[in-house]
Amino acid sequence: MKVTGIVLAGGKGSRMGGVDKGLQPLRGKPMASWAIARLKPQVDEIGGFAGPLAGLHAGLSAATHPLAATVPCDSPFLPADLVLRLKNALGEKDLAVAKTGDQPHPVFVLLKTSLKRNLEAFLKQGGRKIDAWYASLDVVEVPFDDEADAFRNINTLEELGKA
């Protein structure tokens, strides 16, 4: 099955002084471009949209493939096999989410684009928490303990400088 790629961006960037994190330079190019470069070879179509659930809804609205993979713009080191491993685990489930140890990473997911109506209903009822929406779905957590550092996100200018 083909996969649409969605790079989630548009947060407040409050821990980074209110700047757009995805546009901050990392090794000579915007941080979001690193996430896009890592995701692009893993999907058949890619787009970037704002905020986690709002971005996910926008991405699902624009997706033309049966599956969508999401990653945040501030995680430039995501696994090169993220989508493949999530896809292998998805089976008949609604959504596959990456996890390291006991910690799920709710914006590193592969989901069926047919969930758009379910998400719309959740948003119309005032739902805003991504994990509260996941709780209503049939979800499989996929271990990535071998690549735990790949899910590191960059939240501050100090962390950006170190990266």
Image (cartoon, rainbow, N blue to C red):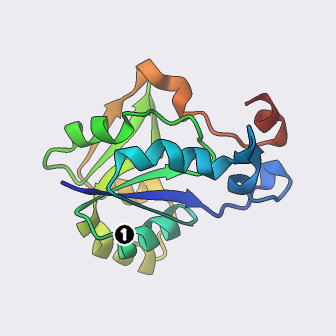
Outermost residue, bottom direction? 124
Outermost residue, front direction? 28
Q: Position of residue 11 (x, y in %)?
A: 67, 61
Quadrant position of the N terminus in the picture: bottom left
Q: Residue at x 38, y 37 (%)?
A: 82
Number of callouts: 1
- Is 105 placed above or below 59 here? above
- Is 101 placed above or below 2 here? above
Relative depth, front residue between 117 and 29: 29
Q: Residue at x 23, y 56 (%)?
A: 2
Q: Say left or right for 32 vs 92.
A: right
Relative depth, front residue between 132 and 78: 78
Does residue 108 appear in this view?
no
- SS assignment at label 1: helix
Residue 145, image quadrant: top left
Q: Say left or right for 159 vs 120.
A: right
The amino acid marked with disc number 1 is Leu
Does residue 43 appear in this view?
yes
- Is 73 placed above or below 152 here? below
Q: Say left or right for 117 vs 28.
A: left
Residue 64, image quadrant: bottom left
Outermost residue, left direction? 92
**Crowd around label 1: few <14 · some 14–19 · many ≥20 (10 Å):** many
Q: Position of residue 22 (x, y in %)?
A: 68, 54
Quadrant position of the C terminus in the picture: top right
Q: Position of residue 159 (x, y in %)?
A: 77, 34
Q: Residue at x 38, y 74 (%)?
A: 62
Q: Kindly identify which residue carries mark 1.
A: 60
Q: Residue at x 59, y 41 (%)?
A: 75
Q: Position of residue 89 (x, y in %)?
A: 22, 37
Residue 108, image quadrant: top left
